[in-house]
Amino acid sequence: MSKVDKKQKIRYRIRKKIGGTSQKPRLAVFRSNTAIYVQLIDDVTGTTLAAASSKDKEIAAQKVTRVEQSKLVGQAIARKATELGLTTVIFDRGGNLYHGRVKSVADGAREGGLQF
């Protein structure tokens, strides 16, 4: 079993337990080597309500570390969520450990006013 297969198995295990609704969407985090992406997902209808990433112009323009960039992404998704009238979300770490950049996204989202 490869590393990718193991991570996918963890993702499926997490997704069995959690799911988002339109009132309480799932905050899904995807971490690549270079960037980090977050989405607010309504699993009932299968739609993405909002998204943010470290590739967004205002975030990519700032010359900071990847961990600090992740915090800015968390704050950006929190702003978009409050514009949609959402205050609570379900955090989905996407098979990654709750550490480093993933934790930084969560901290930024909490600072932005999201509860989870």
Image (cartoon, helix red, strand yellow):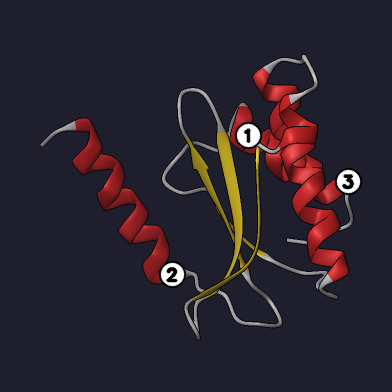
Which amino acid type corresponds to the residue marked 2 in the rendered image? Lys
Residue 90 screen position, x and y as percent: 63, 65
Q: Residue at x 79, y 47 (%)?
A: 76
To which residue does mark 1 refer? 55
To which residue does mark 2 refer? 17
Residue 43 vertical placement versus 9 (above, below): below
Decide which of tag 1 and tag 2 comes sooner along the chain. 2
Mark pair 3, 1: CA separation: 21 Å
Q: Residue at x 71, y 27 (%)?
A: 60
Element at label 2: helix
Element at label 3: helix
Label 3 Cα neighbours within 10 Å, binned few <14 / some 14-19 / many ≥20: some
Q: Residue at x 50, y 85 (%)?
A: 45
Quadrant where the N terminus sits is: top left
Residue 40 vertical placement versus 107 (above, below): below
Residues tagged 3 and 2 counted as in contact (Cβ below 8 A) = no
